[in-house]
Amino acid sequence: MKLTNFVNGKWQQDETAKFRPVLNPANGNELAQVRMSTAEDVDAAVKAAQTAQKKWAKVPAPKRADYLYEIGRLMKERKEQLAQVLTKEMGKVIEEGRGEVQEGIDMAYYMAGEGRRLFGETTPSELADKFAMSVRSPIGVVGLITPWNFPIAIATWKSFPAIVAGNTFVWKPATETPMMAYEMAKIFEEVGLPEGVANIVFGAGSEVGTALIEHEGVRVISFTGSTETGRKVAEAGGRNLKKVSLEMGGKNAVIVMEDADLDLAVEGILWSAFGTAGQRCTACSRVIVHTEVKEELQKRLLSKMDTLTIGDGTDESIKVGPVINRKALEKIHSYITIGQEEEGASLLVGGEILTGGIYDKGNYYAPTLFADVTPDMRIAQEEIFGPVVSMIEVSSFEEAIDVNNGVIYGLSSSIYTADVNRAFKAQRDLDTGIVYINAGTTGAEIHLPFGGTKGTGNGHRDSGVAALDVFTEWKSVYVDYSGKLQRAQIDNEV
């Protein structure tokens, strides 16, 4: 199967186009061939989106929302098929695949509801016989650049609020996971989304991503990926005065206080750290544990880690799937070497690329736990993006908060405690965009803002009503029905 671009409501065929294979990370099998597009392909998509946007913006928002209801309905009907495709191309276990598709379904219905809101504000004017209000207006063409680890959820966080607000979009999915974008394009086509509203251009970030960011017809860039790449996106977007929304890396921590329910904490750590093989921007990478319970937590965690099943995510019994590719395996393993070379850290379990049988054909890394890690070590500071956890010992609540905040990232944090006072202090003092109390660092819901502070983002948010701020401009409207010139503050002098 060859995956070709979807532009202006049509599948683009080009006999001269180049393609690259899409591989299943669980076994190395080729799933499809994906087109490697050019800047010219991006230009064609943007022009189609520009033409379509002029008409789409004039469609009443509740009518735009009707398309999202239909998209959500088809996604719901095809949930299992979509989940199977997702698991095969990305590697996450099938129950996670189903959960991610459900997140897209939820986003479709949620943003469809916003089609009957998109609230502005009315406010009293300071002058007689004058009316004042603000409304949201669409911006134009938006560029979406999405990662491989959540190939459908993150795309829906961005595309659905964009189109319900009256924008059109050009979407560059990750080259590792293009099949979900292909499936979504088929759904867009089937529901009759007007030509040019949704456009998908496959290809490398260096070619397609750069062309999208620099195209003068694209007014907004919404990017999810590494902090290093995000900085480059921000620089390029800033030069062209684009609105840029960035959601980037994380170095998330679970804090376990001495009064915590340890069994609950272990379950939360396991799910947060090793779900999606640690390839989540919200994954737990650090466990900050109080001295009094460190040994017991460590013992229980090691016991539970021993029960994790590792393999092809299409098998219902598997809990940890492969990582995305060989490059990711090598990066993860390089951090094991770094951790072993840092004075004091102890590798308790894992730390190896799995081999033998199916492991030889796929990209599998053993769930890994380091103990006796100090906050300044590289394995405690840098994003590894794999199933690797560092345990850091602290002696107080205040120290735990300081250690949590002592990284360049600020996406997600968690604390396990029975003390309600500590819980409220933690949600106030943890410098992250997401805070969990007595739960792990993953599990965000679509009706709340998603994003982080510091090196994780640049102040914008995906998901929830906050996502509309990325894809709309505020317009202030004044209606003067006095029949005379009124000069605001000049004629309103006290």
Image (cartoon, rainbow, N blue to C red):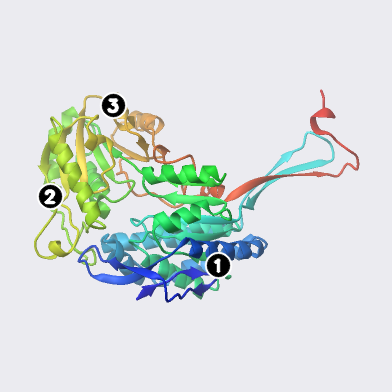
Q: Earlier in the sequence, mark 2 or mark 1?
A: 1
Q: What element carries label 1?
A: helix
Q: Earlier in the sequence, mark 3 or mark 2?
A: 2
Identify the residue position indicated by label 3 in the image.
397
- In the image, is 258 to the left or to the right of 21? left
Q: Is mark 2 on a helix, strand or loop?
A: loop
Mark sitting on residue 67: 1
* Mark 1 Cα-neighbour bin, 10 Å: few <14, some 14–19, many ≥20: many
- Residue 316, placed above or below residue 232: below
Kind of residue at disc 3: Phe
Q: Residue at x 27, y 66 (%)?
A: 23
Q: What element carries label 3?
A: helix
The image position of residue 276, as x and y in percent, is 27, 54
Mark sitting on residue 352: 2
Kind of residue at disc 1: Tyr
Kind of residue at disc 2: Glu
Q: In which quarter of the image is the N terminus?
A: bottom left
Q: Is residue 163 visible?
A: yes
Q: Quadrant of the C terminus?
A: top right
